[in-house]
Amino acid sequence: VRTVVSLDRETQAAYALVVEAIDNGPTGSRRTGTATVYVEVLDVNDNKPIFLQNTYETSVLETVPRGTSILQVQATDADQGENGRA
């Protein structure tokens, strides 16, 4: 079984293929067998994180203590597992 196109887990994560084998018997008495092949496409780190906003803005007093959280931003990543943690 070989691929004829590039695979992308974000487009399709799995495939179910039915394969058939036909023996070389005489025409009319050839025998066949089939099997199902399940293919899971594993993820690679091929997508970048995308922020939910293009810009963020905040104000902070100059007396704010060091280490104070001043803004929370959020991003998403279409990759799976560790590759998708933004």
Image (cartoon, rainbow, N blue to C red):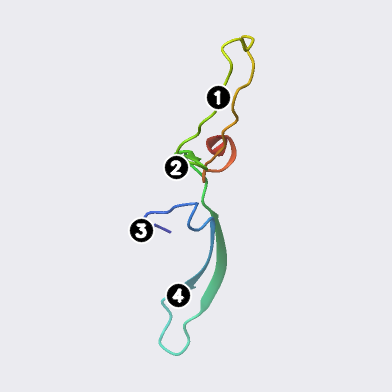
Residue with the mark numbered 1: 59
**Is 20 in front, or is 72?**
72
Percent coordinates x, y for residue 80 in the rendering: 56, 43
Residues 14 and 10: in front is 10
Mark 1 or 2: in front is 1
What is the crowding at mark 1: few (fewer than 14 residues within 10 Å), some, or many (at least 20)?
few
Q: Neighbour class for label 2 at 10 Å: few (<14), some, many (≥20)?
A: some
Mark 4 or mark 2: whose residue is earlier in sequence: 4
Residue 13 image offset from top left, x and y in percent: 54, 55
**Nearer-N-terminus badge (2/3):** 3
Q: Which residue is mark 4?
A: 23
Residue 47, disc: 2
Q: Disc 4 versus disc 2: distance between alpha carbons?
A: 45 Å
Residue at the spot x=48%, y=87% of the render? 29
Q: Amino acid at mark 4?
A: Asp
Measure how far apart labels 1 and 3 are at the Cα level. Answer: 50 Å
